[in-house]
Amino acid sequence: MKLLPLRASSTDSGAAVLIAAISGRALAESARRSGYVPLVADFFGDQDTLNVAGAHVRLDSALAHGIEESALVHALERLSEQRQPLGVVCGTGFEGRTQILRRLAERWRVFGNSAAIVAKVKNPAVLFSVCAELAIPFPDWSLVRPRAPAEWLAKRRGGAGGTHVNPAQQSDGADDEIYYQRKTSGTPVSALFLADGERATVLGFSVQWSSPTPRQPYRYGGAVRPATLAPTITEQLSAAVDRLAASLSLVGLNSADFLVAGDRFWLLEINPRPGATLDIFEPPEGSLFALHMAACCRKLGRPPRYPDGAQASAIVYAENDIHSVPVLDWPDWTADRPVAGSMIKAGQPLCTVYANGSAATAAKAIADQRREMVLAWTSGRNS
């Protein structure tokens, strides 16, 4: 693995914490807001992350292959040479690699769910058994390829970001890591919540959408908060989250993905780590990172108050290979800005765009417009 030079500041005076994720930017920014010094290992090393990180190491293995254990441990060891961290916070990238979480826990304190808990949550047999015991509805599922695959989806255990979801017709049933879930109509709604191992508090609900490609029809595209839900559904979803968090002993920031149709809902999966909606739920005062750290220490804080209106975020994926990202005067409604000269392959994340609006539909429309603007700037198209 090629380690890039560390970027550190001698003026950082807060407590240091390691951050490991496919993309560590959102966690690092939130950590800075709460006074921590983030020491980050991720795949991107974008401008935003480098600006807030006390030190950074870019993981140089292929993004498509995911986080590699020895490379990550090496990177975190090097980051720890800068200053003694309190421990490590893990973002996306570990749901299907719980052995890495076990390895990290041998060396550092992990502020988040343990490898054993993550393995349970991402095992459909365990999760849906718990749901059945708690009377929480969920779609039909199977470990065996259904006889009528057109009505089913194939999902990979431990997958994230929607790229692990495909029509069941595309699966031959030979992969032991694949399970099947019956297609169910409804609006994708995600609940971001804090848990302390016994209780949970929902911070808010968002509606998510996909950015499909022929090979990845359910690739994550973005999210907008708040979700417009009937009060009865809000109460039922919150109660379901509370029961699940207690039964599974979840800690810290997590999210639960549901489908909602009228007065009915179904749980799809739980993401047992800080996830993609951190940015749109980052409060005006305080930080989600501070709430996460406190909850991992069994101190469940009060949910923050959010201003009126809606906020959306959308991922901009490169439509074609970008051999050298041009020098751009990035607007303040962008994040995860790539370093000029970077190479980005078609289909990989280019950046994130944000938008505010009086309502969710307005915020999403602006985010979609801004996504197209960024694609025009970076591809040479006329905007």
Image (cartoon, grey):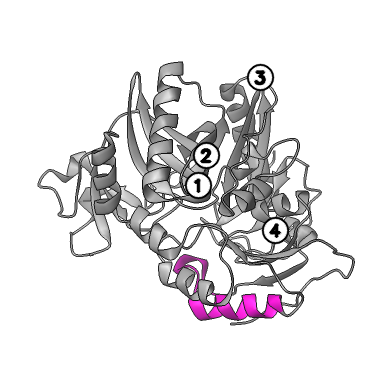
Residue named by callout 1: 254
Mark 2 surroundings within 10 Å by alpha-carbon count, few (fewer than 14), some (14 through 19), many (20 or more): many
Identified by mark 1, the residue type is: Asn
- Which quadrant of the figure has residue 130? top left
Identified by mark 3, the residue type is: Ser
Q: Earlier in the sequence, mark 1 or mark 4?
A: 1
Residue named by callout 2: 192
Expressed as whole percent of the image width and height from the top left, the position of residue 247 reads 36, 46
Q: Which mark is residue 280?
A: none
Q: Is residue 173 left or right of residue 67?
A: left
**Along the viewing direction, whichever of 115 and 6 lies nearer the viewer:** 115
Q: Earlier in the sequence, mark 3 or mark 4?
A: 4
Q: Earlier in the sequence, mark 2 or mark 1?
A: 2
- Foreground mark, 3 or 4? 3
Magenta stretch in the rendered image = 61-80
Judged by its main secondary structure, the magenta piece is helix
Alpha carbons under labels 3 and 4: distance apart: 30 Å
- Foreground mark, 2 or 4? 2
Alpha carbons under labels 2 and 4: distance apart: 27 Å
Q: How many marks?
A: 4
